Image: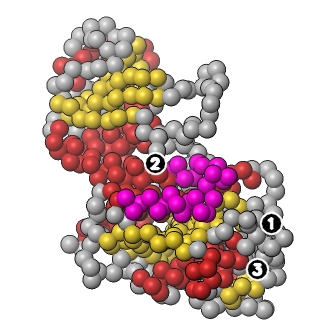
Amino acid sequence: MSDAVKVGFVPISASARGILVVFCDDQLKLGAATRKALGVAAETVKRAAAANQFKGKSGAVLDILAPEGIKVERLIVIGTGKAADLKEKDFLKFGGVAAGKLNAGSGSMTVVAELPEAAMAAGQAAAIATGIRLRAYKFDRYKTKKKDGEDGALRADVSIAVDDVAAARKAYAPEASVVDGVYLARELVNEPPNVLYPEEFARRASQLRKLGVSVEVLDVKAMTKLGMGALLGVAQGSARPGRTVIMRWNGGKKSEAPVAFVGKGVCFDTGGISIKSAGGMEDMKGDMGGAACVVGLMHALAARKARVNAVGAIGLVENMPDGNAQRPGDIVTSMSGQTIEIINTDAEGRLVLADVLWYVAKKFKPKFMVDLATLTGAIMVALGTDHAGMFSNNDELAERLAKVGLETGEKVWRMPLGPEYDKQIDSQFADMKNTGGRNGGSITAAQFLQRFVDGTPWAHLDIAGTAMGAPKTEINQSWGSGYGVRLLERLVSDYYEARK
């Protein structure tokens, strides 16, 4: 995993190195330790702020080269806005803004984790560190040359100056594991499809065994025996055989039922016989963003030794237009015994999820299930790329997801489910069709999936707009965003915290 920026904590009185980053509010007020670190350069800040009309708004930056009176290369002043408006996710943003000022090559940075009123709390300093690492991620392993003006490799040591080093390290330790999980999810989404196909994806997921995760890989023979006809129908057109991977982290009580997460892993999606248009098809290497998130989440939970029982399950296929590919008009039998008429072979992700959801619901009887899938373009029409679409049969689960979405910045928006949508997927020849047509496309897809959860409290997240190619932010500059890892890790943490 790409992790070229190393982050550590030092006492707030430590001498600055390289680039110095400090914070001010919307009145340009600086903290006591910050003023001491700046010395006479504090006056330079005032003059530069006036010259650049810098007002200290949240996330705004004042960049001063070779400031007089202090032995640093650059001085970066980041605005925090009004103190009363500060939220947890703002500190992630501030870390990302700071990391954005790192130049290619080797270097160092010191961040004074202080607000005007007092030193930042340990959790706030940890969020700064998390934001720095999230922003610094870069996927460039296949580039052998850099074009003129293109950023080269980044190597940096960042010291975060804090009031209590031990407390900051303790607060950051679990967050570091979550960042590693996000990195892993991003890596998987960014990989080219000739490198990351179902068997290779399964191999990489199996590496979680090193962290104590139990991993079982189901091959075609095993899935055939289980009756996973919906998933296998999608996979049959590819020379690369499908796989289902079941990951288990048992950090809780032996008698306690797990929570479960299911991911769509279409490693490449041509659309099958209902082939997609050529324009933009290269992006369909990211149609496994849901599975990538689940693997990253399981990594995060295991690496931080979470005291929970969790199941992660991913269905891995390629959807290809081979002579053996399934056709519109085919009828397949899912593991649940329900039959499905194939109307459009490009509505394949729900077929993969159907069998994996049923398998998990029946085998593990989880407290709740959340599935993630880059499922429909329709959700992007409805919500754009700032929210994932959320569908749920359980109000409590939906409310918890909405809450942690706002806290982490990985936002969700609840969409409707209801029996009135069932008529769109009713089939004349089978129990259901795999698509209900253009209108309400993301809703009918979720309505389809609901038929395979066996009454388990469940939420479906349609992440087509957020997992890949989403707008770049202060904490993500990668095509593959790793969306969902931080969201679901927080969901699990809050869920078990509330039940203590």
Left or right placement of residue 11 versus residue 5 in this view = left
Q: Quadrant of residue 35?
A: top left
* Residue 444 visible to the viewer: no
Q: Which of pointers 2 and 1 lies earlier in the amino acid sequence?
A: 2
Q: CA distance from mark 3 to mark 2?
A: 36 Å
Vertical side of 437 occupied by 286: above or below: above
Instruction: Locate the C terminus and report the quarter of the image it occupies.
Output: bottom left
Q: Earlier in the sequence, mark 1 or mark 3?
A: 1
Identify the residue position indicated by label 3 in the image: 342
Classify mark 3: helix, strand or loop.
loop
Where on the picture, by quarter, is residue 211? bottom left
Q: Earlier in the sequence, mark 3 or mark 2?
A: 2
Picture disc at residue 183: 2
* Amino acid residing under circle 3: Ile
Q: How many marks?
A: 3
Residue 140 lies in the magenta stretch: no
Circle 1 residue? 321
Q: Which residues are magenta?
A: 186-210
Q: Residue at x 41, y 84 (%)?
A: 365
The residue under the point 57% across, 52% down is 189
Q: Looking at the image, which is closer to me, 13 or 296? A: 296
